[in-house]
Amino acid sequence: MKKALLFALFFGIGMLAEWLGVTYGILFGAYEYGEALGPKLDGVPWLIGCYWGLLAFITCEMARNKGIPIWLQLCIGAGLMVLLDFFMEMNAPNFDFWAFNGDVPIKNYVTWFVIGLSMQLLLKRFHITGNKTISYHLYTAQVLFFIYFSLIKV
């Protein structure tokens, strides 16, 4: 039940943050979503809220390690979220996911880190765990997908 409630919270946080971005250009910079991610709620694809939740859960599990201090696990988890976003940004316009008005601003990555860190903290606070193998596979598949398309310049 805790997992479902946190996922719903992360969905809501992600949707709100993205709505603020596409509506007012704050948090991430000025951008808009294309059509490839499906139905939208006031300009933000429903899938994006799900993605925030999924990514928070899998990166938290990847960063979980008893030999690493909690504060560093939190930073690693948030950093992994930002790293994937970095590779996604290179390809998003090509896939009609989203496009910034100009270059991707640094505040996009800072905001990703801050929101990601908040999510990581909540997952640690509520002692949420998952499947490390599946988490690594999901994350790696996504990173390799976006790196590949960055290299071939779709």
Image (spheres, helix red, strand yellow):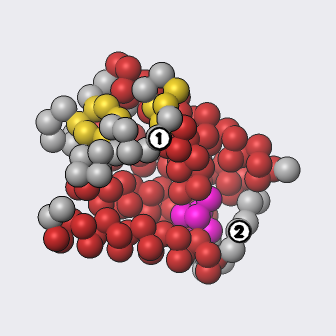
Residue 3, image x, y percentages: 76, 53
| Residue placed under numbered mark 1 in the picture | 38
Residue 18: which quarter of the image? Answer: top left
Residue depicted at x 76% and y 59%: 127
Q: Assign a secondary structure to mark 2.
A: loop
Is residue 78 on the magenta stretch?
no
Residue 67 appears left or right of 112: right
What amino acid is labelled 2 in the image?
Gly
Give the residue displayed 61% in from the left and 34% down from the top.
12
In the rendered view, tell whether residue 141 sits above or below residue 40: below
Q: Secondary structure at mark 1?
A: loop
Query: Camera-side residue: 61 or 75?
Result: 61
Looking at marks 2 and 1 on the same chain, the residue that comes earlier in the sequence is marked by 1
Could you classify mark 2 by the number of other residues whose Cα lies within 10 Å: few (under 14), some (14-19), or many (20 or more)? Answer: some
Q: Which residue is mark 2?
A: 130
- Circle number at residue 9: none
Chief SS of the magenta region:
helix
Q: Between marks 2 and 1, how big is the CA–CA gap? A: 28 Å
Question: Which region is colored magenta?
Answer: 57-62
